[in-house]
Amino acid sequence: MAATPESLWEVRCIPNKGYGMVATAPVEPGTCLLVEKPLYIRAMVDDPIQQQNSIVESLIRSLPDAAQRDAFHALASSFSVLYPDYPYYSIATTNEVALSGAQDGASGLFLRWSRFNHACTPSAYWAWNEDDGASSSKGRRGVLTVHAIRHLNPGDEISISYFENRVMPHDDRERYLAEVYCFACDCALCSLAPGPWRDDVDERLRQLEAFWRKYHLGEDTQGPPSSPSSPSSLSTPASSAATPTITTTSKPSNKDGNIASKEEEVGENVIVDVRALNQQRYLHDAAGCLAECREAAELILEAEEDVGDGAGGEDGDIAGCIDVTFAYEIALALALFVGDAARASVFAARNRDRYTVTLGADSVEALRAGRCAENPCADRSFGLGGGGRRVMMGSDVVPDAEEIGEEAFEEWLWSAEEWQLRE
C-alpha cells in the first residue's frame, strides 16, 4: 500500500522549539507531505485587537468538533505576553497565513501546517491552492499543500520557510523573525558566526534579493517601481504584507469570449504575465535581462550542488532559500516575448520539473509549464515583442545536449545574440 502524506511524519516535542514535524520514513524531494483545508478563513483587517480577538473567538466557538477547538488552543502563542487579555488573537496572529489569489485579502489557519517550524534553508515547500474551480488541480482546491524539497531521513525535522522573500541577508532575516514571530532562528544559515564566510553568503543573498525585487516587485534604482504582477499561489504569513510574484495570470477567455474551462486554461493560459515585467524598462533590453537571469540561476544552482543529495552540505549554504524557478520564470517570459521557441521550450521544461517538486506533478503550474514546453508558440504571449505583431526570433530547434556537451548547451541556452527586439 502506498504511503499517505500523514504516514510520513509525526508531531514531536523538539528541544527549544516546542512541537514540530519529524519524518518517520525516508522522504524524497517532490513527495507530498500535507494536504490540508483551513480550520477557518477570515478577512485580513486592521480592526482593533479586541475586535479581532472576538472575531476569532466566535469562529473557534462555532466549530462543531471539540477536538478542533482543543487543537487550536494547543497551538503556539508568540504574543501571549504582549496580549494576555486576547488569547484568540495571539494564537491567530502567530499561526495564520495570508491567502493570495481568490482569497486575496484573507488569512487562514491550518492546524497541522502550524506545527511545521521555520528554517531559512527549509526542507519543504508550501503553497496555497486557491478554490476558484480552475487554478488548482482536481482534489487540490481550497487546500494548502506541503512538498519535500530535500531528502529526509527518519528522525529529521521537516522545516518550512515562514516568509516568501527567502533571500534576505542575515540581519534582515533576524530582524524580521524577531518582529513578526518573536523568535531567533538557529538554522545552519543563521548560525554562521560573523566573519568572511557569513559576509560572502550575505553578499550572494543581497544579489538575489536585488534580482527578486527588480523583476518580481518592479523595483529599480533607475526609476520608480513598476506595477507589481498578479499574485501567485505562493503566500506570505498573515503577519506580513502579501508579496506578489510572477507565476500565472488571471483566467483567460476561450474563443467565444467566455471564461475558459480548466482544460482550456491549462493548455492556453500564458505562463507569465509579461506586462508585469514593465516592458518599457526591462524588455527593451531582453539580452541584458537574460544575462541577469543567468547570474541569479547560477548562484542558486551552485548552492544546490553544495548540498548534494540533500543529506548534508556546507554549513550556511543558501540552497533552499530560494528555488531556481525564481530565475527561470523570468527567462521564460523573455523567451516567449521575443518569440524564441527553442529557448522557451527549455525554460518551460525546467519550470515544469521544479513545479513538480515544489507543487506536485498534478498542479496546474506544472501542467501548464509542460504544455508550454511542448508547444511554446501556442502561448498567447509568444512573439509579442514585435511591435504589435507576432514575430519569431531565434531558432526553433533545441540542440542535443548530449551531442554538444552540457557546458556548450548552457552557453547556447543563455545566449541572446539572435534577439533583436523592435521598438
Image (cartoon, rainbow, N blue to C red):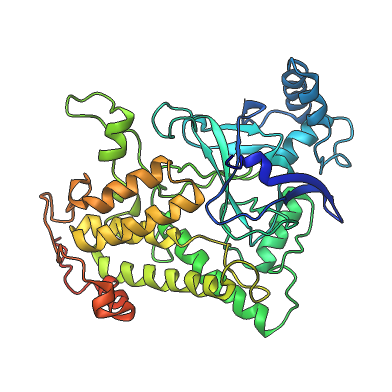
Residue 70 rendering spot, x and y as whole percentages: 83, 26
Residue 112 rendering spot, x and y as whole percentages: 70, 37
- Tell me where residue 365 sits by quadrant: top left
The residue positioned farthest toward the bottom in the image shown: 196
The residue nearer to you, when weighing 152 against 108, is: 152
* 384 versus 72 height, above or below: below
The residue positioned farthest toward the front in the image shown: 1
Left or right of 339 in this view: 221? right
- Tell me where residue 189 sits by quadrant: bottom right
Residue shown at the point (28%, 46%) measured from the top left: 371
Residue shown at the point (25%, 63%) measured from the top left: 343
Q: Is residue 275 visible?
A: no
Residue 421 rendering spot, x and y as whole percentages: 16, 63
Residue 318 rendering spot, x and y as whole percentages: 59, 69
Residue shown at the point (85%, 36%) measured from the top left: 83
Left or right of 31 in this view: 72? right
